[in-house]
Amino acid sequence: MSSDSIKSILQEHRTFEASAAFKQRAHIGSQDQLQAMHAHAEQDPIGFWEEQARELSWGSKWDTPMQWNYPTVEWFVGGTLNASVNCLDVHVATEKRNKAALVWESEEGDVRTWTYQQLLADVNRFANVLLDQGIKKGDVVGIYMGMIPEAVMAMLACARIGATHNVVFGAFSAEALRERMDNSGAVCLITQDGARRRGSVQRLKAVADEALAHLPNIHTVLVAKNVGNDIVMSRGRDHWLHELMAAAPMKHDVQLFDSEHPLFILYTSGSTGKPKGILHTTGGYMTQVKYTSKYVFDLRDDDLYFCTADIGWITGHSYIVYGLLANGASVLMYEGAPNYPEKDRFWDIIERHQATVFYTAPTAIRAFMSWGEAWPRKHDLSSLRLLGTVGEPINPEAWMWYYDVIGRNKCPIVDTWWQTETGSIMIAPMPGVTTMKPGTATQPLPGIMADVVNKDGSPCKPNEGGYLVVKHPWPSMLRTVFGDEKRYRDTYWSHFEPCDKHDGYYFTGDGARKDSDGCFWIMGRVDDVVNVSGHRLGTAEIESALVSHAEVSEAAVVARPDEIKGNALVAFVIVNANVPTARKAELPALLREHVAAEIGPIAKPDEIRITDALPKTRSGKIMRRLLREIAGGGEVTGDTTTLEDHNVLENLR
Ligand code: PRX
């Protein structure tokens, strides 16, 4: 981390408000109400979170709301609860019993629905299967599945018996799966025969078998039947889930666990390679995912909420499963690709099911833009009332497109900033009241004390770029990096240690600036900051300028060492599909001028490479460290296990 501050060069002045009709029905519909919530949280942060925690069902109540011993935190100490009870049983006891909990659509178009009552019965059966297989409280259970209902049931069944789940994204390689199972000490793996993706079958069980050959401690493998493709079963170890579930009782005597009981481990790939097992526990996590789901998505009882994230990511954990079900919402889950059979699959799904809330990632929005607005325009999307984004900064062009073409200028957009580590949304608009500006996640939610600071921890001035930190522990904070306490401390708590000026801050790894209205503009990972002629620039801003050009759909900017300037800026750019080849030759020069005009000559890339694809993680994040190696002319030596498509690297070379 350099001592210099980060220079911000992006300017955006458009603002938007929710309609009067939206405000009127919103949970938080007035500034007074929001300010009162902020004031309560500032005066008494712990009391504020206790109030949110009381929205859950507890066995015994906590005796200590928070125990903070830098950098270790415990929330609601002494309290007991069960996460799956809070997602299911509490609703089955009410008039929500026969409400849809899960509406699932396969890539082939089959639709199946589980009411809360039905989902509880299946989760109970699943929990009984796990117990019967000798899985017990505290065991780690791997889940290597696609987007099928059994994946949700698997998570809830683990939670029900106190086993800690470790979901590995279904398109990861055998090696990535092996490493994550091995590192977490998993004893059971839940997988499926195959998953459908863009009309073909991903053979999950076959990939799992490769990993399992090196995982002698996994004594039980449960296989959900989804596609019906041929698989090999290892006798004694492997079982068809549907056979065991059919024989299992649907009653289950549920146990309650300590608030700090580990709920799940989820691996996130750091920019330096070896993935970190982020550990989340029960009471604090459930408190904050429930609170944020309710207010940020402004949930109403008649909503049908559609999130396109995979359950292999934190977004799927918090905002498909735990946060939404804890609120008794109806969740729409789709198995397959957005462009199968055609590029309007999401819009078709929204129209047919009358989805009301839609949550996706900027990278997906840019793909929709490049496919052309004729696809969404074919559909009646008037059921939508709220849109959301997550995962990376949304460039204002993409925001405007989303607002206009998908939201038809009537849906507020919640740009939600958070991380695997934070567990829940931290910075986001309250959709009924916060003034939206394209490109900013706006302000921290009540209860979250985030700030932008200099290297010494002092607050940055308005519009001065710096480091995004959180100043006070929050309930759904990661508890550690599984099995690596030192890495936990080094990564998150060593940059702003307690000193005479402050009590120590959590470092997010992101660069940001706060504007004069107190809105947070995320400038990307500080690892991705580039130093140009002594100015430190966030790559996100230069990329945003590039994609604001009508012919560009995606861009990534990195620095390569340059003998004269120290650093030269290299931009990798994907142009829209309809740009003719001859035009592609002209574009680099034009784009350099475009960036100069948009944000200033200082940010003008030295080199622009037009390419067909960018190296991305499976969750759609551009792997800039690989591009840095390519731009520098060297071999790619870093870890590439999380790369979505290895051919991309070949082509870039
Ligand atoms: O850099 C920020 C970016 O994604 C990082 C967290 O990534 P991950 O743990 O994979 O979680 C993604 C889903 C929560 C952050 O440190 N990021 C996430 N949301 C935003 C964002 N950057 C800007 N704006 C956002 N809304």
Image: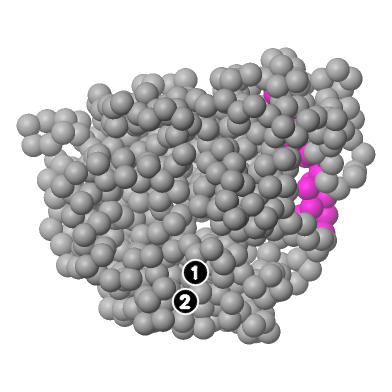
Quarter of the image for the N terminus: give it: top left
Q: Start and end of the magenta stretch? A: 188-207
Compared to residue 26, the image places residue 6 above or below, namely above
Q: Which of 493 and 528 is in front in this view?
A: 493
Judge whether residue 134 is colored magenta.
no
Judge whether residue 203 is colored magenta.
yes
Q: Element type at marker 1?
A: strand
Which residue is at a point 71% across and 16% down the rendered structure image? 134
- Residue that carries the numbered disc 1 in the rendered image: 387
Colour setup of the view: one colour
Note whether residue 535 is visible.
Answer: no
- Residue that carries the numbered disc 2 in the rendered image: 411
x then y, percent, for residue 349: 69, 69
Q: Are marks 1 and 2 in contact (CB under 8 Å)?
A: yes
Mark 2: amino acid: Cys
Q: In which quarter of the image is residue 576?
A: bottom right
